[in-house]
C-alpha cells in the first residue's frame, strides 16, 4: 500500500488518478465497440470467437446472448465453433431458446 492508502495492484484506482485517462473499454450495451462485436457475432460467429473471444477474452456478446459464463463461452468457441474435428460438440441448451425466433444467434 502506498502512502496515499491505495493498493498498488489496483490498476483502475491508479489510472483513475491520471486526469483524462480511461483504463477500461466501454462495454455497455450502447457502446460502438459492443454494437460492432454483436454484429460480428451474429454475422460471423467463427470470426467473433477467434478475433474477440479466444484472442482477447472479451466474450461479452456471447455471454449475454447465451447466458453463459466466460469460461463456458471460450470452451464453446474452441470446441464447437473453431474446431475442425468431425466429432459433435456439447452445445449449451441456452443456444436453443424457444422465443419464437428459432436457434440463436
Image (cartoon, grey):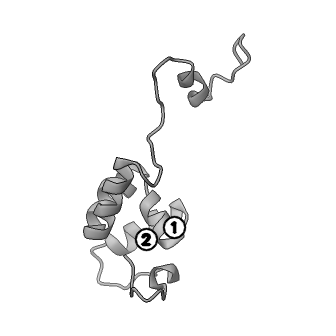
Relative side of 83 to 22, left or right: left
Q: Which residue is drawn at 39% across and 72% down?
A: 79
Image quadrant in which you'd find residue 2? top right
Contact? badges 2 and 1 (CB < 8 Å):
yes
Question: Does residue 99 appear in this view?
Answer: yes
- In this rendering, the count of numbered labels is 2
User: Tag 1, which secondary structure?
Assistant: helix
Q: How busy is the neighbourhood of tag 2: few (under 14 within 10 Å), some, or many (20 plus)?
A: many
Q: How busy is the neighbourhood of tag 1: few (under 14 within 10 Å), some, or many (20 plus)?
A: some
Q: Which residue is drawn at 45% across and 55% down?
A: 29
Residue 34 versus residue 65 in the image, above or below:
above
Q: Which residue is drawn at 48% across and 31% down?
A: 23
Residue at image mark 2: 76
Which one is nearer the viewer's eye here, 66 or 101? Answer: 101
Question: Does residue 82 appear in this view?
Answer: no
Image quadrant in which you'd find residue 1? top right
Q: Residue 72 carries which label?
A: 1
Q: Which residue is drawn at 57% across and 30% down?
A: 12
Which one is nearer the viewer's eye here, 7 or 27? Answer: 27
Q: Position of residue 22 (x, y in %)?
A: 47, 29
Q: Position of residue 76 (x, y in %)?
A: 43, 71
Which one is nearer the viewer's eye here, 2 or 24? Answer: 24
Q: Position of residue 71 (x, y in %)?
A: 52, 62
Amino acid at each position: 500500500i502506498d502512502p496515499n492508502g491505495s493498493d498498488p495492484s489496483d490498476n483502475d484506482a491508479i489510472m483513475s488518478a491520471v486526469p483524462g485517462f480511461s483504463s477500461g473499454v466501454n462495454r455497455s450495451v450502447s457502446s460502438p465497440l459492443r454494437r460492432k462485436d454483436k454484429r460480428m457475432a451474429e454475422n460471423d460467429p467463427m470470426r467473433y470467437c477467434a478475433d474477440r473471444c479466444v484472442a482477447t477474452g472479451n466474450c461479452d456478446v456471447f455471454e449475454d446472448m447465451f447466458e453463459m459464463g466466460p469460461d463456458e463461452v471460450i470452451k464453446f468457441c474452441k470446441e464447437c465453433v473453431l474446431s475442425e474435428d468431425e466429432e459433435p460438440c456439447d452445445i449449451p441448451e441456452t443456444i436453443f431458446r424457444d422465443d419464437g425466433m428459432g436457434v440463436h444467434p
